[in-house]
Protein backbone atom coordinates (compact mmCIF):
# COMPACT_ATOMS: atom_id res chain seq x y z
CA UNK A 1 0.00 0.00 0.00
CA UNK A 2 1.17 3.53 -0.74
CA UNK A 3 2.87 5.36 2.15
CA UNK A 4 0.95 8.56 1.37
CA UNK A 5 -2.38 6.78 1.69
CA UNK A 6 -1.35 5.14 4.96
CA UNK A 7 -0.08 8.43 6.37
CA UNK A 8 -3.25 10.31 5.49
CA UNK A 9 -5.41 7.47 6.85
CA UNK A 10 -3.37 7.50 10.06
CA UNK A 11 -3.78 11.28 10.37
CA UNK A 12 -7.57 11.10 9.85
CA UNK A 13 -7.89 8.23 12.32
CA UNK A 14 -5.86 10.21 14.84
CA UNK A 15 -8.21 13.21 14.40
CA UNK A 16 -11.23 10.96 14.98
CA UNK A 17 -9.59 9.54 18.11
CA UNK A 18 -9.05 13.05 19.46
CA UNK A 19 -12.73 13.86 18.81
CA UNK A 20 -13.79 10.69 20.62
CA UNK A 21 -11.55 11.58 23.55
CA UNK A 22 -13.27 14.96 23.95
CA UNK A 23 -16.70 13.33 23.51
CA UNK A 24 -15.97 10.88 26.33
CA UNK A 25 -14.62 13.69 28.51
CA UNK A 26 -17.74 15.80 27.86
CA UNK A 27 -19.99 12.94 29.02
CA UNK A 28 -19.33 13.92 32.65
CA UNK A 29 -19.44 17.70 32.17
CA UNK A 30 -21.61 19.70 34.56
CA UNK A 31 -24.62 21.13 32.71
CA UNK A 32 -26.25 23.29 35.37
CA UNK A 33 -28.73 25.89 34.12
CA UNK A 34 -31.20 28.32 35.62
CA UNK A 35 -34.79 28.73 34.45
CA UNK A 36 -37.69 30.89 35.57
CA UNK A 37 -41.17 29.38 35.40
CA UNK A 38 -44.60 30.94 35.92
CA UNK A 39 -47.36 28.91 37.52
CA UNK A 40 -51.01 29.85 37.94
CA UNK A 41 -51.16 28.46 41.45
CA UNK A 42 -50.77 29.92 44.93
CA UNK A 43 -47.35 29.71 46.54
CA UNK A 44 -48.37 27.35 49.38
CA UNK A 45 -49.89 24.60 47.23
CA UNK A 46 -47.08 24.93 44.71
CA UNK A 47 -44.45 24.39 47.39
CA UNK A 48 -46.23 21.21 48.52
CA UNK A 49 -46.37 19.93 44.94
CA UNK A 50 -42.69 20.67 44.38
CA UNK A 51 -41.76 18.97 47.66
CA UNK A 52 -43.67 15.83 46.61
CA UNK A 53 -42.05 15.89 43.17
CA UNK A 54 -38.52 16.07 44.56
CA UNK A 55 -39.29 13.42 47.20
CA UNK A 56 -40.37 11.07 44.39
CA UNK A 57 -37.12 11.84 42.55
CA UNK A 58 -35.13 10.85 45.70
CA UNK A 59 -34.03 14.37 46.54
CA UNK A 60 -34.00 15.60 50.11
CA UNK A 61 -33.94 19.11 51.54
CA UNK A 62 -30.30 20.01 52.23
CA UNK A 63 -30.74 23.68 53.18
CA UNK A 64 -33.50 26.19 53.70
CA UNK A 65 -32.75 29.92 53.63
CA UNK A 66 -35.78 31.71 55.05
CA UNK A 67 -34.29 35.16 54.39
CA UNK A 68 -34.17 34.67 50.62
CA UNK A 69 -36.87 31.98 50.44
CA UNK A 70 -34.53 29.55 48.70
CA UNK A 71 -34.70 25.79 49.22
CA UNK A 72 -31.75 23.56 48.30
CA UNK A 73 -32.54 19.95 47.42
CA UNK A 74 -29.79 17.35 47.14
CA UNK A 75 -29.82 13.89 45.63
CA UNK A 76 -27.50 11.32 44.08
CA UNK A 77 -27.76 10.97 40.31
CA UNK A 78 -27.04 7.47 39.04
CA UNK A 79 -24.90 7.08 35.94
CA UNK A 80 -26.51 5.50 32.89
CA UNK A 81 -25.64 1.88 32.11
CA UNK A 82 -26.53 2.49 28.47
CA UNK A 83 -24.13 5.42 28.16
CA UNK A 84 -21.31 3.55 29.91
CA UNK A 85 -21.70 0.61 27.51
CA UNK A 86 -22.11 2.92 24.52
CA UNK A 87 -18.89 4.81 25.35
CA UNK A 88 -17.04 1.51 25.82
CA UNK A 89 -18.21 0.26 22.41
CA UNK A 90 -17.28 3.58 20.76
CA UNK A 91 -13.83 3.44 22.34
CA UNK A 92 -13.40 -0.18 21.20
CA UNK A 93 -14.30 0.74 17.61
CA UNK A 94 -11.95 3.72 17.65
CA UNK A 95 -9.06 1.73 19.12
CA UNK A 96 -9.69 -1.07 16.61
CA UNK A 97 -9.50 1.40 13.70
CA UNK A 98 -6.41 3.03 15.14
CA UNK A 99 -4.82 -0.40 15.72
CA UNK A 100 -5.53 -1.52 12.16
CA UNK A 101 -3.87 1.59 10.73
CA UNK A 102 -0.87 1.16 13.02
CA UNK A 103 -0.70 -2.54 12.06
CA UNK A 104 -0.47 -1.56 8.40
CA UNK A 105 2.30 0.92 9.15
CA UNK A 106 4.23 -1.40 11.48
CA UNK A 107 3.29 -5.02 10.65
CA UNK A 108 5.75 -6.54 13.13
CA UNK A 109 3.75 -5.09 16.05
CA UNK A 110 0.28 -5.97 14.72
CA UNK A 111 -0.70 -8.25 17.63
CA UNK A 112 0.45 -5.67 20.17
CA UNK A 113 -1.62 -2.94 18.52
CA UNK A 114 -4.73 -5.14 18.43
CA UNK A 115 -4.23 -5.81 22.14
CA UNK A 116 -4.87 -2.11 22.76
CA UNK A 117 -8.60 -2.86 22.40
CA UNK A 118 -8.43 -4.17 25.96
CA UNK A 119 -8.16 -0.52 27.05
CA UNK A 120 -11.67 0.33 25.79
CA UNK A 121 -13.49 -0.43 29.08
CA UNK A 122 -11.54 2.48 30.58
CA UNK A 123 -13.95 4.83 28.77
CA UNK A 124 -16.97 3.28 30.51
CA UNK A 125 -15.21 3.29 33.88
CA UNK A 126 -14.22 6.95 33.41
CA UNK A 127 -17.85 7.86 32.69
CA UNK A 128 -19.21 5.73 35.55
CA UNK A 129 -16.91 7.33 38.13
CA UNK A 130 -17.47 10.88 36.92
CA UNK A 131 -21.21 10.82 36.21
CA UNK A 132 -22.37 9.38 39.54
CA UNK A 133 -22.44 12.39 41.83
CA UNK A 134 -24.54 14.42 44.22
CA UNK A 135 -26.62 17.02 42.41
CA UNK A 136 -28.17 20.11 43.92
CA UNK A 137 -31.38 21.82 42.91
CA UNK A 138 -31.82 25.42 44.06
CA UNK A 139 -35.47 26.44 44.18
CA UNK A 140 -37.03 29.79 44.93
CA UNK A 141 -40.79 30.44 44.75
CA UNK A 142 -42.10 34.00 44.76
CA UNK A 143 -45.72 35.15 44.59
CA UNK A 144 -46.55 37.40 41.66
CA UNK A 145 -49.43 39.84 41.64
CA UNK A 146 -51.93 38.75 39.02
CA UNK A 147 -54.64 41.21 38.10
CA UNK A 148 -57.29 38.57 37.59
CA UNK A 149 -56.71 35.79 40.12
CA UNK A 150 -53.90 36.74 42.53
CA UNK A 151 -52.62 33.15 42.33
CA UNK A 152 -49.57 33.44 40.12
CA UNK A 153 -46.12 32.33 41.28
CA UNK A 154 -42.64 32.68 39.82
CA UNK A 155 -40.30 29.72 40.32
CA UNK A 156 -36.57 30.15 39.85
CA UNK A 157 -34.84 26.77 39.55
CA UNK A 158 -31.11 26.12 39.18
CA UNK A 159 -30.35 22.49 38.34
CA UNK A 160 -28.96 20.11 35.74
CA UNK A 161 -30.66 20.71 32.39
CA UNK A 162 -32.09 17.17 32.26
CA UNK A 163 -33.66 17.67 35.69
CA UNK A 164 -35.15 20.98 34.53
CA UNK A 165 -36.71 19.31 31.48
CA UNK A 166 -38.17 16.53 33.63
CA UNK A 167 -39.58 19.05 36.11
CA UNK A 168 -41.25 21.07 33.35
CA UNK A 169 -42.74 17.97 31.70
CA UNK A 170 -43.96 16.31 34.88
CA UNK A 171 -45.52 19.37 36.50
CA UNK A 172 -46.50 20.95 33.15
CA UNK A 173 -44.71 24.22 33.87
CA UNK A 174 -44.11 26.93 31.27
CA UNK A 175 -40.99 29.13 31.07
CA UNK A 176 -41.48 32.77 32.05
CA UNK A 177 -41.25 35.55 29.50
CA UNK A 178 -37.97 37.39 29.08
CA UNK A 179 -39.52 40.33 30.99
CA UNK A 180 -39.30 38.33 34.28
CA UNK A 181 -35.55 37.71 33.96
Image: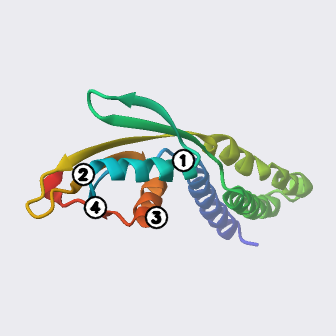
Nearer-N-terminus badge (2/4): 2
Would residue 164 be found to the left or right of residue 111 on screen? left
Nearer-N-terminus badge (3/2): 2
Discs 2, 4 touching: Cβ within 8 Å: no
**Who's the residue at 71% across and 71% down the image?**
2
Q: Which residue is mark 4?
A: 175
Q: Which residue is mark 3?
A: 170
Residue 79 place in picture, x, y as percent:
65, 50
Q: Secondary structure at mark 1?
A: helix
Residue 130 place in picture, x, y as percent:
63, 41
- Callout 1 environment at 10 Å: few (<14), some (14 to 19), or many (20+)? some
- Callout 3 environment at 10 Å: few (<14), some (14 to 19), or many (20+)? few
Nearer-N-terminus badge (3/1): 1
Discs 4, 3 touching: Cβ within 8 Å: no
Front residue (pair 69, 44):
44
Would residue 86 be found to the left or right of residue 165 on screen? right
- Callout 4 environment at 10 Å: few (<14), some (14 to 19), or many (20+)? some
Front residue (pair 161, 25):
161
Discs 3, 2 touching: Cβ within 8 Å: no
Amino acid sequence: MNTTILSSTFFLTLLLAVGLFFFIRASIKDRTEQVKLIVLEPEESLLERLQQYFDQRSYRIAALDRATGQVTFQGFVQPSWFLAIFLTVLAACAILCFSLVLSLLYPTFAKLFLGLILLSPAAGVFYWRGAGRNEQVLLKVEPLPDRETDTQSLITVTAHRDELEQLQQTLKLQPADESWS
